[in-house]
Amino acid sequence: MSPAIASVELAIETHGLTKQFGRQAAVAGIDLAVPTGSVFGFLGPNGSGKTTTIRMLLGLASATSGEISLLGRSMPGSLRSVLPRVGALVEGPAFYPFLSGTANLRRLDTADPGASAATRAARVQHALERVGLTHAAGKKVHAYSLGMKQRLGIANALLMPRELLVLDEPTNGLDPQGTREVRSLVRSLAAEGTTVFVSSHLLAEVEQMCSHVAVMRAGTLVAQGTLDELRGAGEAHARLDTPDPVAARQVLERLGLTPVTLVSAAGAPGHLSAALTAAAPAPEDIVAALVAAGVRVRGFTVAAASLEERFVALTGEGFDVAQ
Amino acid sequence: MSPSDPREPAVTGPAVTGPDSTGPAASVPEPTGHAAIATAVARPRGASGAALLGSELTVLFRRRRTWAMLAALAAIPVLIAIAVRLTSSPVTPGRGPAFLDRITQNGLFVAITALIVSIPLFLPLTVGVVAGDTVAGEANLGTLRYLLVAPAGRVRLLLVKYAGAAAFCVAATLTVAVSGALIGAALFPVGPVTLLSGDTIGVGESVLRSLLIAAYVTVSLLGLSAIGLFISTLTEVPVGAMAATIVLSVTAQVLDALPQLDWLHPWLFSHYWLDFADLLRQPIDWTSFGANALLQGGYILVFGALAYGRFVTKDILS
């Protein structure tokens, strides 16, 4: 077993975790620190190494180098004692199509040597209830929709009381209602004290659910911290919609702001954003100054920093935010 | 596997885990066959393999595919019996499969004839499908990652998978034997059987002998199952593993038929497949049974160790 890198406060801790596929590094030396009790958003574009990292955390793939500690114990050395305390949804749900939802959960439950046979039926029932699948429990998974399979996958992660949940894209394939249910499920689990590590490429989802965030880009960790730290310590932004972006930019710069041109979905260039630092004038004065300078204002909003702006800055172009 | 109380609470703590060889990054000793299997069984947490084995058998025998294959096997003796029954001319001794000429005199021979007909192709075909599917099938469905995260334990899962394949071997040969006995009794007279040694045994004992032959055939298929298990750990495409296993069984029989490769014959897993005639003598000659069991045991050890070496270090990326 590797020397103790364990820390009581961290549910997941990695040091220099690396996975090499041939000459390409899928994950290149990341240092994750997931505090116990947090809802930790693991963000990154597709192919940035999120799932590979999760596979290494769970002992499915071996790390080329680096150390992993899960719930204070070294992995994969302590796999047998750690994994029963971890529920996981890895790269989408997977089930036996010819078995019913209930039969599938029972099957996967027998694989856990610590799962009691006496309480199996009750636990399966309870897990199905928690994800709202009781009505379809007897149906063959073959007949399930993608959203139902996703729910069944989450139910599988909840078969036993867990200290840590690793959910890889848990809302994939869910309708808006299902997405909301998953969000509230995650919140209620976190309230019970479960640490939730959730990977996603949906910024809005992470913003609503998570207390902590890490961002992956091409196999490296480009940011990690609490949601507020990542948003720029709660720094608000002013967003301006104007047909006169050039003049507006001059006015804003004169006021001591550093405006950034935002590219809207339609590609129109008339959107500017500027961080409202402590030294910045009051928003109403900014608008007054703009109007006085002859800038036509279509819209002006003040909003707390969104992750999106931060991420575009962190991960550069090519980040598939919309996906 | 030692039986254990599955209600035993989850034991977590430093006391339970030694250096755990099921982790992929843990140092993996050279495959050591028996030793590897023994350590797996001795591990306290690996003890409740009974529940997983039960689940494995349930999944195997709830599949329509399994039942389709067993139905096809059951049809073989039925076809033979009906064909013999409908033919007016007596079967010439020495033509067709062994014992075919005896069927009209004694229905009990239908089972034995059907086993002989099934051994070269039909039984290896179905066993190849099941054994090739063991690990690759789970990988293909994606359930392999969930079994391992549960955590099933890689060695425990491999042992359970092999036990499942072995259970299918038993089911397959028994299906042929029982179906043969039933159709034989329905269409032909049943009476005392004259053995190859000239002795005559009663119906009861001849049924026992049929079961003994079924056991012989089951043992014959265990080596092939181990090969299938190993091939199954190499791929995520179950059809590929199935095809490779079946092709190997045919290849072994072709090689066994080439006199130029005499030296190789005793090492081929199919070499003793048809040598169960000794079980039809009085007293029973166990030589071929023993030689066959030894050979199959060797194949189980070698390919079990290879499967172990491959599977415990494998990155599960499906």
Image (cartoon, coloured by chain):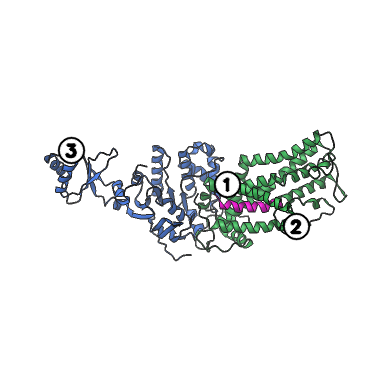
Chain colours: A blue, B green
The residue beneath circle 1 is: B238
Query: Residue B226 magenta-drawn?
Result: yes
Q: Amino acid at mark 2?
A: Gly
The answer to whether residue A177 shows anywhere in this view is yes
Query: Residue B132 magenta-drawn?
Result: no
Q: Estimate the spatial distance between the alpha carbons at disc 3 and disc 2, rounded to whole Å.
A: 94 Å
Q: Nearer the viewer, mark 2 or mark 1?
A: 1
Q: Nearer the viewer, mark 1 or mark 3?
A: 1
Chain ID at mark 2: B
**Please, which residue is most extreme toward the left here?**
A292
Q: Secondary structure at mark 3?
A: loop
Q: Position of residue A261 (x, y in %)?
A: 23, 45
Q: Secondary structure at mark 1?
A: helix
- Mark 2 and mark 3 in contact (Cβ < 8 Å)? no
Q: Which residues are magenta?
A: B219-235
Q: Estimate the spatial distance between the alpha carbons at disc 1 and disc 3, rounded to whole Å.
A: 64 Å
**Please, which residue is most extreme toward the bottom here?**
A3
Q: Is residue B247 left or right of residue A277?
A: right
A183 above or below B157? above
A137 above or below B309? above
Instruction: Identify the residue at image location x=46%, y=58%.
Output: A63
Chain ID at mark 1: B
Q: Position of residue B247 (x, y in %)?
A: 65, 48
Q: Secondary structure at mark 2?
A: helix
Q: Which mark is residue B290?
A: 2
- How packed mark 3 is, by other alpha carbons closer than 10 Å (few <14, some 14-19, many 20 or more), is some
Work out whether mark 2 precedes mark 1 in sequence or the reverse, and give the earlier one.
1
Q: Which mark is residue A297?
A: 3
- Mark 3 and mark 1 in contact (Cβ < 8 Å)? no
